Amino acid sequence: MNSISNLIEEFLIETLGDGDTVNISRNELALYFDCAPSQINYVLSTRFSLERGFIIESRRGGGGSITLIRVASDAPGIMAYLDSIRDGKEGIGYVRAAQLLRRMAEDGLITARDGFIIGAAITDKALLSPAGNKDILRANVLDHVLRTLLKAADIK
């Protein structure tokens, strides 16, 4: 018998289909599966992580709107994700940035050493900026450094 978590995961993957994004309401999904919204959060955080090739963008209000984004594990996919970060107004938190760096190293897009150095450069400690600006500053630094590394890899 399938657990509710498996059913929610299967539903989201089917809804995503061949597309790269899907917008859902956490509360509507919880009503559909007759479960608590925390169950939806659990499935999203454990089965749709960056390590598994997904980004989750969450918006407060309006029933907990969520955008699930499939991130290709190649340079163009990473560039597209960097575009979405740069175009956003929220920036990127350290945990998500570190997950991205780890995945890129695992996929051979950057070296583990590069990921470690970039990770050190984008910590809250390294970014001397007011708290509200750190995620935006981190997104800009991450964007420029990763684009430079990916372009340098194409030059070789």
Image (spheres, rainbow, N blue to C red):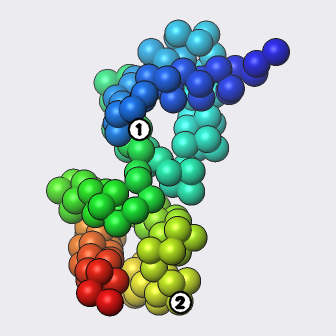
Looking at the image, which residue is at 30% across and 61% down?
Answer: 76
Q: Amino acid at mark 1?
A: Leu
The x, y position of residue 98, in whole percent, is 50, 70
The x, y position of residue 23, in whole percent, is 34, 29
Disc 2 to disc 1, C-alpha distance: 29 Å
Is residue 14 found left or right of 9 in the rendered image? left
The x, y position of residue 153, in whole percent, is 34, 83
From the image, tell me which residue sits under label 2: 113
Is residue 41 found left or right of 135 in the rendered image? right
Q: Amino acid at mark 2?
A: Arg
Please determine whether, in this image, residue 6 is positioned above or below residue 119: above
Q: Quadrant of residue 46?
A: top right
Count the numbered circles shown. Answer: 2
Q: Observer-nearest residue: 54 or 27?
A: 54
Looking at the image, which residue is at 45% across and 15% down?
Answer: 28
Q: Quadrant of the N terminus?
A: top right
Disc number placed over residue 68 in the picture, else none: 1
